[in-house]
Image (spheres, grey):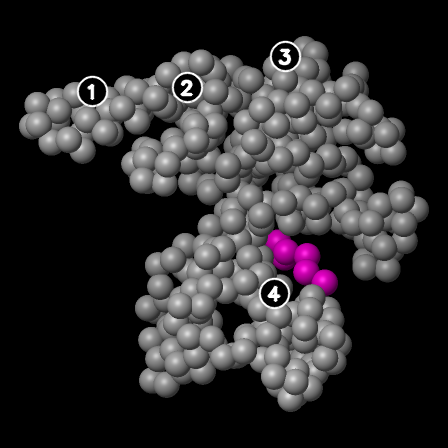
Amino acid sequence: MTGISERTMNAKMKLGIVGLPNVGKSTLFNAITRAGAECANYPFCTIEPNVGIVPVPDERLDKLAEMYHPERVVPATIEFVDIAGLVKGASRGEGLGNKFLSHIREVDAIVHVVRCFEDPDIVHVDGSVSPLRDIETINLELIFSDLEILERRIEKTKKMLKSGDKKFLEEMEIYEKIKETLESGKPARSIPFAPQQQEIADQLFLLTSKPVLYAANISEEDLSSAEENDMVKAVREYAASEGSEVIVICARIEEEIAQLDDEERKAFLEELGLKESGLDKLVKASYRLLGLISFLTAGPKEVRAWTITRGTRAPQAAGKIHSDFERGFIRAEVISFDELMQCGSYTAAREKGLVRSEGRDYVMQDGDVTVFRFNV
């Protein structure tokens, strides 16, 4: 498909899984993707990043499938990249530092796996387990890398100030604010910029400006009392200070769950007293982190979830399906998923006047069941 709008093409969907060596990154990645990424008890087992594309859990698709009996059901997907573990000095090229940083630069958001369990059989790169120290190690390497980029930009902007153009003065103020924040040990994403200032900051493509989701990896023994785990509490407190979310997982358990079929999986989760797997929570949280929503299409041939960025208007959403839909957009016929379920069928919903006709300015909502009308 060519001609799809830049905005819908760029609905961001790529997350990098990072963490120190031996915190459970590759174990978690195996569980997420069932890709069999190599996993071993020694540093730098992951060198080149493994990539896996996984479906976003969405019960609405199952219910639409019951209504339409389609030939196929296509969920939304999200991409995870298992990035090499890093050590202190990565920003100076220590270990696999340069590769690690370049791979992070390519993702849209970060899932930071933090070890929150003791196990004498699994070595820790620093000799002991300390979640906050581990978080700080990675964050400092990202900060050091960002400072290097920022200092070069500041030097260049200082020269441009001689032109007298006020825009360079505004840029310099923003750069200095970011530098001050980074030097205090805080990430760039913690700065509450106004939208116009944020646009300038985004042009730096800083690593610490990327949104982060912390995954607190606990042991099987702690599964039933995760919220009482002091290490988890410490991670939650830290994440709250920078406005980030935390999910609690047991990577080993998730890897076991991933090997089961649907029936076995359901029974195993019930046995553990869980409503959903940690992986389902992770994928859903990642979807939210990237500011994504899904609109739905349904018919006898296909029931499908389409990924768009929150705030996308109807013509651009149509372009997600095919460029002709956007180019020749006439209107979108829309009903919310919940209203459709209450009516029992699309025909019944239309008879009740619940199917709305929306124009070019309509902002798509999560769960909109949509038919696009177009003419090319």
In this picture, residue 173 sits left or right of residue 336:
left
The span from disc 2 to disc 4 (Cα, nearest Å) is 39 Å
Q: Position of residue 44 (x, y in %)?
A: 57, 26
The residue carrying mark 3 is 126
Q: Position of residue 225 (x, y in %)?
A: 86, 30
The residue carrying mark 2 is 181
For residue 359, the mark is none
Query: For the residues carrying marks 3 and 1, which lies nearer the camera in this image?
Result: 1
The span from disc 3 to disc 2 (Cα, nearest Å) is 27 Å
Q: Position of residue 31 (x, y in %)?
A: 70, 44
The residue carrying mark 4 is 367
Identity of the residue drawn at 58% across and 24% down? 241
Query: For the residues carrying marks 1 and 4, which lies nearer the camera in this image?
Result: 4
The amino acid pointed to by label 3 is: Asp
Report the magenta residues as a range: 54-59
Query: For the residues carrying marks 3 and 2, which lies nearer the camera in this image?
Result: 2
Image quarter where the N terminus lies is: bottom left
Q: Position of residue 312 (x, y in %)?
A: 44, 60
In this picture, residue 219 sits left or right of residue 192:
right
The residue carrying mark 1 is 155
The amino acid pointed to by label 4 is: Gly
Question: Which of the two residues, 182 or 17, is positioned nearer the viewer here?
Answer: 182
